[in-house]
């Protein structure tokens, strides 16, 4: 096996896992599956709380690390099983850890090579890469706070841009807290939704009362980047 192929293995595994999950697991990682198994999950939680926490963390981390469909359902399940607290904390820990594993896999694969090629190539891409590295804390936190940016893209782009692990990990754990609180609170109320035979309102993240504060936080986190760019332009 060539070195080039070995570097591609982590990303190949992620892509294959995503494709397999989309085909074979979609029905198992769904709201309907959660509704059908809710009583069994609650019974197991009541009988084995610590094991339930452990299994939940491992399952959610694997879902994110392999980019499988179902991360939103996993977040709802965390709220349903554990309430807003510690459900939100468990959701942040699992989703953040899975994101870090994706980042590390991408960096171990083609990430470092792609980053070096962008830097050597110059042009707009190199300037964008340099700006992201220079303002990593602010830029990454802003990306995490904007609901419209896909989660997996926020995991892969920093790896290809050569961003260091520390700012990626810290901004990931911090940046997903607001969204995790919103969806965990929805999950905590699923008992009533199940009783009525309804479905949760996952569009709540785009409701003005939720979206505007998130965008406000994103704007504040982007402020250092904007000010830095303005100062460099003036100097």
Image: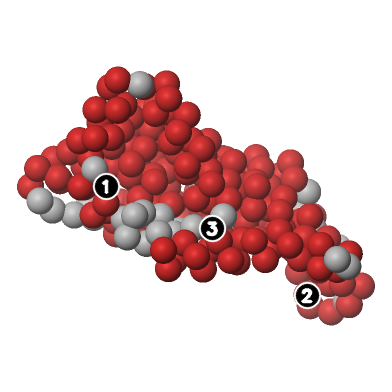
Q: Quadrant of residue 15 in the image? A: bottom right
Residue 190 rendering spot, x and y as whole percentages: 21, 42
The foreground one among 119 and 46 is 46
Residue 140 rendering spot, x and y as whole percentages: 64, 53
Q: Is residue 124 left or right of residue 86?
A: right
Q: Earlier in the sequence, mark 1 or mark 3?
A: 1
- Seen at 28% across and 42% down, the residue is 187
Task: In the rendered view, tell whether residue 121 sits above or below residue 133.
Answer: below
Residue 27 rendering spot, x and y as whole percentages: 32, 60
Q: Earlier in the sequence, mark 2 or mark 1?
A: 1
Label 1: which residue? 34
Task: In the rendered view, tell whether residue 177 sits above or below residue 121.
Answer: above
> From this viewpoint, is residue 21 visible?
yes
Q: CA distance from mark 2 to mark 1?
A: 43 Å
Q: Badges 2 and 1: C-beta atoms under 8 Å apart?
A: no
- Seen at 39% across and 28% down, the residue is 52
Q: CA distance from mark 1 to mark 3?
A: 19 Å
- Considering the numbered disc 1 on the image, is that residue within a helix, a strand or a loop? helix
Most extreme residue toward the left, as rendered?
196
What's the mark number on residue 67? 3
- Considering the numbered disc 3 on the image, is that residue within a helix, a strand or a loop? loop
Q: Quarter of the image for the N terminus: give it.
A: bottom right
Count residues near mark 2 (Cα–Cα under 10 Å), then give few for <14, some for 14-19, many for 20+: few
Count residues near mark 3 (Cα–Cα under 10 Å), then give few for <14, some for 14-19, many for 20+: many
Q: Earlier in the sequence, mark 3 or mark 2?
A: 3
Label 2: which residue? 125
Count residues near mark 1 (Cα–Cα under 10 Å), then give few for <14, some for 14-19, many for 20+: many
- Seen at 50% across and 50% down, the residue is 63
């Amino acid at each position: 096996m060539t070195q080039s192929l070995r570097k591609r293995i982590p990303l190949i595994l992620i892509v294959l896992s995503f494709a397999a999950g989309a085909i074979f697991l979609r029905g198992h990682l769904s709201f309907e599956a959660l509704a059908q198994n809710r009583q069994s999950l609650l019974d197991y939680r009541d009988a084995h709380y610590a094991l339930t926490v452990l299994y939940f963390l491992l399952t959610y981390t694997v879902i994110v690390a392999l980019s499988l469909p179902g991360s939103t359902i996993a977040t709802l399940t965390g709220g349903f099983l554990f309430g807003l607290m510690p459900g939100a904390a468990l959701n942040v820990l699992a989703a953040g850890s899975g994101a870090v594993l994706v980042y590390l896999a991408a960096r171990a694969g083609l990430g470092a090579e792609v980053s070096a090629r962008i830097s050597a190539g110059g042009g707009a891409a190199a300037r964008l890469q340099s700006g992201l590295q220079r303002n990593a804390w602010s830029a990454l936190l802003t990306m995490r706070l904007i609901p419209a940016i896909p989660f997996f893209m926020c995991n892969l782009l920093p790896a290809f841009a050569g961003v260091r692990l520390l700012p990626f990990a810290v901004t990931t754990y911090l940046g997903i807290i607001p969204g995790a609180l919103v969806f965990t609170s929805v999950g905590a109320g699923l008992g009533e939704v199940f009783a009525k035979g309804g479905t949760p309102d996952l569009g709540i993240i785009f409701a003005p009362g939720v979206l505007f504060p998130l965008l406000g936080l994103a704007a504040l986190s982007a402020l250092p980047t904007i000010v830095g760019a303005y100062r460099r332009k003036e100097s």
